[in-house]
Image (tube, grey):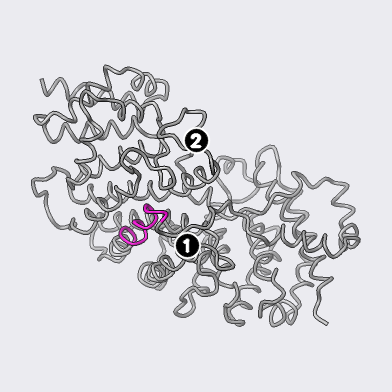
Amino acid sequence: MWEVAGCLVFLIGALAVARDEILQAIVANRTVLRFLFVLVTNASTPADLLEEILSSLMALSEENIEFGQALIDDQETRCYSHLLKLKDSGGSRGMLSCGVLHNVFFSLQWQDCSPGVDGASDAMLVPSIAKVLETTALAHTANGNHSADPADVLQLAFEVLASIGADFQSALERGNQQGKKTKPEAKTDEERGEIEDGDPMEEDEPDVPAGNDEVGEDEEEDNEEGGESDDEMNEDELLEDMELVTGADDDVPEESGLEDLPTLKALIQQAVPQCIKWTHISLVSDEAIALQNHALSALNNIAWTVSCFDFANDENPGIFRAWQPVAKKIWSRSLAPILESDTADLKLATIVTSIAWAISRSLGGNTPLKGDEHRRFMALYQASRGQGASISNAEPEDEDQDPFQGLGVKCIGVLGQLARDPAPVDLNRDIGVFMLTVLSSLPATPAADAIEALNQIFDIYGDENAACDKAVFWKDDFLKHLEEVTPKVKAMVKSIDKRQFAELRDRADEAILNLRRFVSYKKKHAPK
């Protein structure tokens, strides 16, 4: 009987991942779901079969509100209650149960701002995952509580944690959008909305504020040679333009304390310290190297989630007070040692740079640099160019890739944040000159790299009260250099085929428009 049940479970799991239509048909069949629920709750189910079932349930539950509702509504087996108990059992069973529950919580919108039955949200899963990360040793063998290899258990724990970190921000934004509406325990598919499973960087990276959808040929010609239409703007219009160019551009949550966000609190206080521990383990085996990468991926998702809170002007002070020491610890204990090792692994360098960007977005010029880390990122940028890690703007084979996910763009992003006030003037100058060099290298510089360099320059030197404005921007005549590269930027924009690279062209159009606004504003506000 168990062999037949195992074959059925295997087939259900394999079919579920074959096509979306099959998955939906399985979920719609309550007999099939009841079969799986009964096996989960049956005390006689063999351990290996239980893990196979939980793995299938993870596939069925991902972003699937119908499955979530079926699980919660099931009163015959009470599988949901059983999963809540299993989540604390440790090992692969516990982590698979956490994975299923996370998928259900996310699909039903059971989150910090609208918890489900008995206050259910991801906040109750993070401690179970952190405990596994704390108590599981890579060298130990299975202890009878689970049959999986410790490395597999740890990998699963990191993957679920990374998913919680990635989904938290979108769930929080979704809750804020609902605002003052009544929040039901479950919603229809239309109300729920959808979220992609990609790298969190895709949603979390700072975007330039939307200007015109397209810079027309006539407008481009009218704005050449100093931007004649811009010169006619009055003072209020210029200030408004500068807010568009340099203002905060993330859809950040409203001000909130950490006590109001128990999931985030658990991630910062319990999960992150365990991730840090696993990032500096001894890399004596392929398993250890893989686990370090999984730990870094989890840190990356959590760091980017926190970086999307607005900490400017003392916003969200409770979250910042909790995050600041943790962020500095990530930098000093997880990132700095890898940067100092001059790793030749560009995949590792890419995720380390991504985390560094997220942390420096939170800390800005207060990032705890120990020495010449900024030069390490400059060297990584050059390495990315040499290895082709930064995506070009004109190769058809790159059409399906996101040009803003390259190592080059991420290096520029980190450097831009490190140069923010109150960064030392010498550090700011080094980075400012580097940004201008990236721009002056056009057309050899990839379009995405040039766009990010412009965005960072706007943000670094947009505040005329910052020390670097007079000491670097005006003293080193950065305005003249920006005017000199404007024709190159314009040529870059025109070279991008908007039919093949629509987002890249849109971002490039915004960049050239913002460049003209920025130059016009700085001209009118030159120091006396």
254 relative to 356, above or below? above
Query: Which of disc 1 and disc 2 is earlier in sequence?
Result: 2
Residue of label 2: 194
Real-space CA distance between mark 2 and mark 1, rounded to the nearest whole angstrom: 28 Å
How many marks do you count on the picture? 2
| Label 1 CA crowd tier, 10 Å (few <14, some 14–19, many 20+) | many
The image position of residue 446, as x and y in percent, is: 63, 55
Q: Is residue 519 magenta?
A: no
Residue depicted at 18% across the width and 51% down the height: 150
477 relative to 63, above or below? below
Q: Is residue 268 magenta?
A: yes
Residue 353 has which mark? 1
Q: Secondary structure at mark 1?
A: helix
Residue 520 versus residue 190: which sits nearer the camera? 190
Q: Secondary structure at mark 2?
A: loop
496 relative to 441, above or below? above
Q: Magenta span: helix, strand or loop, mainly?
A: helix
- Which quadrant does the C terminus fall into? bottom right
- Which quadrant does the N terminus fall into? top left
Left or right? Give the position of 339 relative to 476.
Answer: left
Residue depicted at 37% across the width and 71% down the height: 337
User: Amino acid type of disc 2?
Assistant: Glu
User: Amino acid type of disc 1?
Assistant: Thr
142 relative to 352, above or below? above
Q: Which residues are magenta?
A: 260-272
**Mark in the foreground, 2 or 1:** 2
